[in-house]
Image (cartoon, coloured by chain):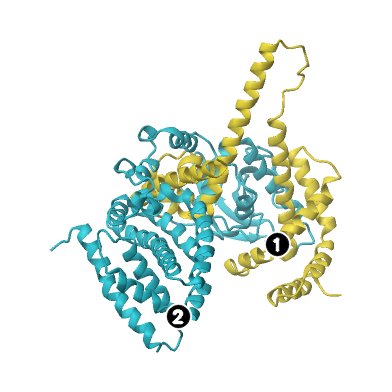
């Protein structure tokens, strides 16, 4: 049998009547080794819940007053001193994010779970309101200590609520449950965590914010939506370029930087400066980088695509260079690491044997792959695969 | 005298023990000052920007970054790529390199947003002045909105990095393609769609909160 949501809520609060009696007996017996603070807190919540729902959940006022009269002075003080509004505010803020997850869950089944968690945050705020109501009643019964705590807590709660008021739009994702809770309250308007922006027309607000089409929004919400969806690209940051340089960039960061370098001259210039200044870092006094020596025809063979009597630069990257040396007797491809900490391995394949890597020699200039006589390679291309230390593979094609 | 590696090991030990290590770190990077200035000059040459006076400022900037997070970052690189990580000196010089690159990128942006060359002052009619004032106000408003957006995005990166990563690829990189975003991030297409959707919602909520706080 599925209970009507209101029936389930009313049953929950009716159970508080018995709970108040049990807690009163507990306080009167004074048998808790850890002190009565926790029981005092539970009693204030239970009594306050009933006082705030007296129309729908009537309870004998005399029994509620008798329960409050059992609250010991030191127990009340200990409860007050142990109360953390910071923790409660953090809980409600977390509930706001949980509400967004409820409205736009990862999987279809997850929404209800997130909504339950989020509502628990709002219920925590509601229980504080019940405590304040119970404190106010205790003050009216002549307890001056309760009056002092009530005044201090009310002021601190008001300040917290002002900060939390910006979170109201988040809570619209829970409106169905919020309205159900609000219906049971005597003074629902005071409970903004249940009632602010809780009309049915607010129910789809989070889903509307999550959509690209702003037609479901109006006013300031529409303005911010247009701001968010305005075309823009984010400049690559110092940290991203640095991580890219030292091999710690995520795949998304690498994709972003390399894509932006194709269209943004600033990023392209930054990558060029990175490569050029690296030579200044890896000077001859640096023992952890490969020593540069004149290779066959010299390795500094001009800019990309330059054809000289020595080397044609096929690829020039921050991590490595690929150079092609053409002689009639033998064609060489040299993969020259520029960054020992980024370069892991390289292989070269010809079209005639695409699965068999070409043999190579490790030289002072890098990995030297002999490809064979020039006559036999006319019209062919070689595939150079370089693996970097971050696991990425870069493929370069060289026309022979 | 301790070698660079010995001094750096001492600095790492002092840091781990919660001792002050700034003096030792200062002594270490001072040894690398000359090399740092060479690196800065190389970046200046590549960027066609900068003056000789910039070198020391950039060196100090790099020292600050090395002090606050460089040591932990260096250890992270060493742990992730054992045997392949650079020396502390090389790592520091890379920080210097990037400080210089960043400085001249930012300078380029500032120059590009300035007024066009050769603009002369001339007498304006009151109508033209009013229009110029309105245009300036509109430009300022657009600039403020731009700033607000990036502040919201940085908050998203801190509080919901998964959503920020998906949004960054989808919107800032103009990918507009959940299949490609999913492939790069190693998630399903449905996940990509949901993350982008939540990112959109959070960004708008943050902006609404900011506007509410300004009221």
Front-lying residue, A319 or A46: A46
Could you tell me residue A94's position as x and y percent? 44, 59
Binning the other alpha carbons within 10 Å of mark 1 as few (below 14), some (14 to 19) or many (20 upward) gives few
Q: According to the colouring, which chain is cyan?
A: A
Nearer to me, A312 or A175: A175
Q: Nearer the viewer, residue A325 or A393?
A: A393
Parent chain of label 2: A
Looking at the image, residue B111 lies above or below residue A322: above
Dot 2 alpha-carbon crowd within 10 angstroms: few under 14, some 14 to 19, many 20 or more: some
Is A339 displayed left or right of A250 in the figure? right
Q: Secondary structure at mark 2?
A: loop
Query: Which residue corresponds to mark 1?
Result: B68
Q: Is residue A394 visible?
A: no
Q: Quadrant of the N terminus of chain B?
A: bottom right
Count numbered badges in the picture.
Answer: 2
Image quarter of the C terminus of chain B = top right
Q: What residue is at 39 percent from the left and 71 percent from the top?
A: A44
Residue B140 visible to an observer of this rendering:
yes
Q: Chain of mark 1?
A: B
Q: Nearer the viewer, mark 2 or mark 1?
A: 2
In the rendered image, residues at marks 2 and 1 fall on the same chain: no
Residue A282 pos. (x, y %): 74, 57
Question: Left or right: A189 with respect to B49?
Answer: left
Tell me, by letter, which chain the rendering colours yellow: B
Image side of residue A56 versus residue B75, left or right: left
Which of the numbered marks, if any, corresponds to residue A72?
2
| Position above or below: A72 against B71 | below
Q: Position of residue A159 (x, y in %)?
A: 53, 55
């Amino acid at each position: 049998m599925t209970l009507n949501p209101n029936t389930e809520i009313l049953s929950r609060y009716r159970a508080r009547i018995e709970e108040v009696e049990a807690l009163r007996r507990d306080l009167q017996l004074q048998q808790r080794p850890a002190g009565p603070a926790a029981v005092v807190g539970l009693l204030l919540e239970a009594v306050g819940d009933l006082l705030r729902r007296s129309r729908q959940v009537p309870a004998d006022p005399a029994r509620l007053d008798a329960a409050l009269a059992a609250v010991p002075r030191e127990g009340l003080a200990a409860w007050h001193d142990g109360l953390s509004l910071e923790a409660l505010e953090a809980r409600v803020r977390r509930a706001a994010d949980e509400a967004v997850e409820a409205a736009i869950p990862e999987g279809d089944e997850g929404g209800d779970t997130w909504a339950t968690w989020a509502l628990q945050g709002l219920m925590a705020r509601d229980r504080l309101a019940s405590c304040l109501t119970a404190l106010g009643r205790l003050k009216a019964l002549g307890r001056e200590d309760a009056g002092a705590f009530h005044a201090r807590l009310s002021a601190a709660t008001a300040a917290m609520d002002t900060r939390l008021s910006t979170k109201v739009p988040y809570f619209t994702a829970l409106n169905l449950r919020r309205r159900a809770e609000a219906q049971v309250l005597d003074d629902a308007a005071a409970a903004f965590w249940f009632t602010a922006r809780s009309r049915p027309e607010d129910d789809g607000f989070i889903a509307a914010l999550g959509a690209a089409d702003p037609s479901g929004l109006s006013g300031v919400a529409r303005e911010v939506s247009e701001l968010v969806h305005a075309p823009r690209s984010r400049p690559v940051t110092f940290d991203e370029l640095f991580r890219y340089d030292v091999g710690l960039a995520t795949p998304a960061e690498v994709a972003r930087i390399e894509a932006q370098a194709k269209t943004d001259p600033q990023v392209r210039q930054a990558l060029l400066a990175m490569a050029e200044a690296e030579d200044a870092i890896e000077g001859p006094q640096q023992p952890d980088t490969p020593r540069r020596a004149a290779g066959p025809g010299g390795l500094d063979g001009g800019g990309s695509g330059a054809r000289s009597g020595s080397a044609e630069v096929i690829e020039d990257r921050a991590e490595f260079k690929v150079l092609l040396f053409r002689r009639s007797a033998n064609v060489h491809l040299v993969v020259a690491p520029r960054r020992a900490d980024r370069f892991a391995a390289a292989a070269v394949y010809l079209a005639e044997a695409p699965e068999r890597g070409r043999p190579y020699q490790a030289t002072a200039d890098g990995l030297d792959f002999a490809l064979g006589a020039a006559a036999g390679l006319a019209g062919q291309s070689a595939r150079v695969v370089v693996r970097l230390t971050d696991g990425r593979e870069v493929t370069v094609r060289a026309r022979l | 005298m301790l070698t660079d590696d010995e001094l750096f090991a001492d600095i790492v030990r002092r840091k781990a023990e919660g001792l002050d290590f700034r003096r030792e770190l200062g002594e270490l990077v001072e040894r690398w000052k000359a090399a740092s200035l060479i690196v800065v000059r190389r970046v200046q040459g590549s960027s066609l920007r900068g003056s000789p006076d910039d070198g020391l400022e950039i060196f100090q900037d790099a020292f600050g970054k090395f002090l606050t997070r460089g040591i932990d970052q260096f250890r992270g690189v060493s742990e992730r790529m054992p045997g392949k990580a650079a020396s502390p000196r090389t790592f520091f010089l890379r920080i210097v390199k990037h400080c210089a690159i960043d400085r001249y990128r930012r300078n380029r942006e500032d120059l590009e947003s300035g007024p066009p060359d050769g603009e002369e002052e001339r007498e304006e009619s009151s109508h033209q002045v009013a229009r110029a004032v309105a245009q300036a106000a509109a430009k300022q408003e657009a600039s403020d909105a731009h700033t607000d957006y990036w502040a919201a995005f940085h908050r998203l990166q801190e509080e919901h990095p998964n959503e920020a990563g998906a949004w960054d690829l989808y919107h800032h990189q103009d990918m507009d393609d959940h299949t490609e975003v999913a492939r790069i991030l190693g998630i399903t297409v449905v996940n990509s769609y949901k993350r982008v959707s939540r990112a959109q919602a959070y960004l708008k909520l943050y902006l609404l909160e900011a506007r509410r706080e300004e009221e």
